[in-house]
Image: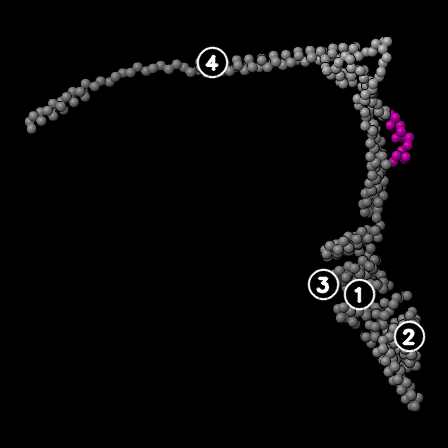
Amino acid sequence: MSAINNALSELAKAQTISASSIEKVHVPTIKQKPRWPWLIAGFSLSLAMGGWAMSQQERALQQDDVIQPHQQSAVTSESALAEVASLPSPTAKVTSASDTIYSAPAPIRLPLPEVVDVAPQVSVQASTVQASIVQPTTTQQSESSLSSRASSPSLKPDDAPRFIANVSKPNASESLSEASASPTTDRADGVVVVEQVELTPIQLARKAQERGKKALDANNLADAIEHYNDALRYAPRDSQIRQKLAALYYGKGEVRKAVDLLQKGIAIDHDDMDVRLALSKLLIKEKQNAAALTPLVHLPANPHLDYLSLRAALAQKNNQNALAQESYQQLVAIEPENGRWWLGYGIQLERGFKLPEATSAYQQALNKVGLSSSSQQFIRDRLNVLSTLEEQSNAN
């Protein structure tokens, strides 16, 4: 054990000696060369390369400019030689061959249409603008310039001579003088007529009515009512437009508007039988028979059959005997061959206790046309009753 301890102690001493003998080594620093000279050298080299490339490009352009005039002069000399060679000999027989190099297209004149602009409610103004068509001035190309264009370096001296056609167009002054000399003969060329026409209220109403019909065909009720309102505003006395608009309101379910519209028409024209008749029929559809008679109480001059017949029927139904008798009396005067009018007239005379006149009216009804078998049987029964009443009155 002592030997081992001695060995270990010696080893430890040796390590301490070696550790104490380590010294610091001083390494000299390496100096780096500056980099900016390399940067300057690279930049200078790039500038030199760019300048050299630009100089080469300019030299190539100068060479092209020198070559092109040389080629043009060569072509010109060749064309001159070709012209000299193509000249015929004084003793030779010249055969002229003409080839058309260019032919001018015929001028095309397009007629300008007359435009009519229609604007409503605008005073008439007409402005005529005449635009004279001036053809371009005459351009005559010289024979030498055309021949230099037509010739090419491949021309041979033995080619036949060519005659170049000169193309000329009419002078601008000549065309202007022709246009001013006859402005009416060629009116379709270069004339635009713009007219503004004032439409009458009737025409405006017809236009709006047509738009309303188109809207109805397209099942557009709102637009149709709007257009018919416009038409009625232009022509408030047009009973047809008023009746159509009232029918549209009634079909839409607005009965009050339809009635008011027809009543306004009666207020505008007191003798308008069509509007009165339309209002009466509308009230009949609403089952207002007493109110339906009100528009027909007024009897205009020369009433037509429809007005009188509806007036008589409503008056008879509402026990208005005076109105009914008046209406039937006019009906038998207008159509004396109609048995229905005589039957109604006889009934009203009987209600008024005018028995002899009623008997005569019933007998006239039996001799006229237009009655059914049941109506004829009713007349016979009434005649029997009237004859019985007359016998009783005579007996008394």
The residue to which callout 3 is attached is: 253
Q: Mark 1 to mark 4: distance in Å?
A: 112 Å
Q: Residue furthest bottom?
A: 395
Q: Amino acid at mark 4?
A: Ala
Reading the chain from its start, which is encountered first: label 3 or label 2? 3
The amino acid at mark 1 is Leu
Residue placed at 77% from the left, 61% from the top? Answer: 247
Residue 311 position, x and y percent, is 84, 70
In the shown orientation, is residue 370 left or right of residue 262? Answer: right
Number of numbered discs on residues: 4
Residue 366 is situated, as x and y percent measured from the top left of the image, at 90, 77
Tell whether 113 sits left or right of 44: right
Foreground mark, 4 or 3? 4
Answer few, some or many: residues within 10 Å of disc 2's Cα (few below 14, many 20 plus, some between 14 and 19): some
Residue 17 locus on image (x, y percent) = 16, 20
The quarter holding residue 83 reads top right
Range drawn in magenta: 173-187
**Amino acid of disc 2:** Lys
Label drawn at residue 41: 4
* Quadrant including the N terminus: top left
Q: Nearer the viewer, mark 1 or mark 4?
A: 4
